[in-house]
Amino acid sequence: MATRLPPPKRQKTYHGVPEPEPEAPKPSPNIVVQFVSEDDGRSLAPAVNLPANTSREGLEVLLNKLSTQDEDPVPFQFHVVLPEGPDTKPGAPTRIVIQKSLEADVLDHASEAFSPEDVFVSVFRVRPATRCSSTLSGHSSPILCASFSPTGNLLATGSGDTNARLWDLNTETPSHILSGHVGWVLCVEWEALERKLATGGHDGHVRLWDPKTGKPIGEAMKGHSKWITSLSWEPIHINPSSPRIASSSKDGTVRVWSTSTRRTELTLGGHSASVNVVKWGGASGPKGVLYTASSDRTVRIWDAESGRAMHTLKDHAHWVTTLALNTDFVLRTGPFDQTGKKPASDKHAQELARMRYDKLLATTPEILISGSDDHTLFLWSPFSSSGSQKPVARLTGHQRQVSHVAFSPDGRWAASAGWDSSIRVWEGRTGKFVATLRGHVGAVYRLAWSADSRLLVSASKDSTLKIWDLKTYKIKTDLPGHTDEVYCVDFVADKVVSGGRDRTVKM
């Protein structure tokens, strides 16, 4: 049976004239808006990307939704400050009050002071990574370590194929191959002014590279009889012109190298087994101190100037495999903060780095957390006013070995990852337990914090990365994509990079 179509609609006519065509809406540019309180200049909500024709009422509703301070809706008035120019007349208005929409009042303003490219006010926040933007292959063996440079423009990865590689993050493409090691490249570490990159290998050598050209700086630094387990640079606020570098090795020693002569300046012997981690802190002496964690179950603290042992912290019952300082982030990024300003000279860099370091330590001494295969962590504060050798707190809860511990950049939180597939968050000053983050189904190998301390990313044996929100302690984003275990992860600005057994780098 055939279906009859209904007759076409009769066209409406007004006095015999057909209805005019509806006007197409004018395309409106998108702009990023940051709401800032007029009283104290603090940000009321994260920056949002809006169509410029959002009405004033729409802005008010949005700000009330985003703002967490008040339960009930609050009426807001919005304005934009006019930039002062050479031809500004005295007594001219200094601000534009928004009555209709940003587009009508600001972008189409008679002064033509604003274009869609202008930033009105901006406040520093990190966007979470939500997808894999590129998969970079090139390494022919599993990727064992990855690290962003302090400014976040370059990335270095080290692999079992004996090469390290440099990648350009703006274009997400490979820039240089650093070949020279004759064994696996086990660690890569950036100098905090981004002038040099150090790599440590299974061959027991430490090598320095120029990241601009990808060429080695001199010969390999030889001295260790077994492989290198970790590297740490001297902080910029102590030595900006040619910082030294410390390397720890499976042979039970730590060596401090001069980067200009590439000779060993100090050899720290005292551990009776493999030294698993070395960290160069800025506390105590004029040259700072070295913290070392070893498989002989101790953490030792050394004076970086003379090489003498200052403290031995013996409370762990098994190998100590990981260490973190509350100053790690500030020491690693040196003079660079989120504004991206470059220091003019070494002396300027030293002042900026010193300022950032002192700002963090204004309210707390340099604190250390050590994690061990005895399933526990200890929080130590060896340079507090009491100066005691006893741990401030014992952090228990992991059911299996602790694989990694990391302080948040502001030093308020610490997160530890374990072979029990869980991540635990602790208070950074007292060591009090805060929360357990569950979601991985395999051992968690590495953690990295976002620069604003609000997000944490974890890499696991289960081949996924997960980004955790520290407001809710829940998974914010799951990042699958690797086909095998993920061994390393790093977080800078809004990019997360990871590498693992499947030989690819993902961003």
Image (cartoon, rainbow, N blue to C red):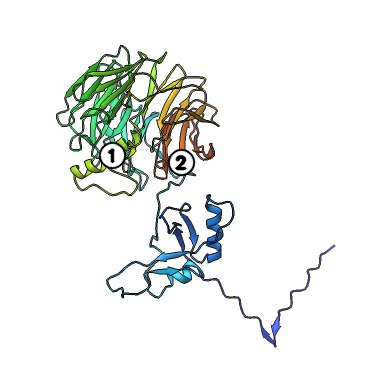
Task: Write down the quadrant of residue 221 in the picture.
Answer: top left
User: Which residue is identified by label 1?
Assistant: 334
Whether residue 393 is visible, yes or no, is yes
The 10 Å Cα crowd at callout 2, few under 14, some 14 to 19, many 20 or more, is: some
* Image position, residue 210 (x, y; %): 23, 38
| Label 1 element class | loop
User: Looking at numbered disc 2 in the image, what kind of residue is underneath it?
Assistant: Arg
Quarter of the picture containing the N terminus is bottom right
Whether residue 203 is visible, yes or no, is no
User: Looking at numbered disc 1 in the image, what kind of residue is underneath it?
Assistant: Gly
Residue situated furthest right in the rendering: 1
**Residue 367 relative to residue 238: left or right:** right
Closest to the observer: 356 or 328? 356
User: Which residue is identified by label 2?
Assistant: 454
Q: Name the residue located 60 percent from the left edge and 75 percent from the top edge.
A: 22
Label annotation for residue 179: none
Q: Name the residue located 43 percent from the left edge and 72 percent from the top edge.
A: 108
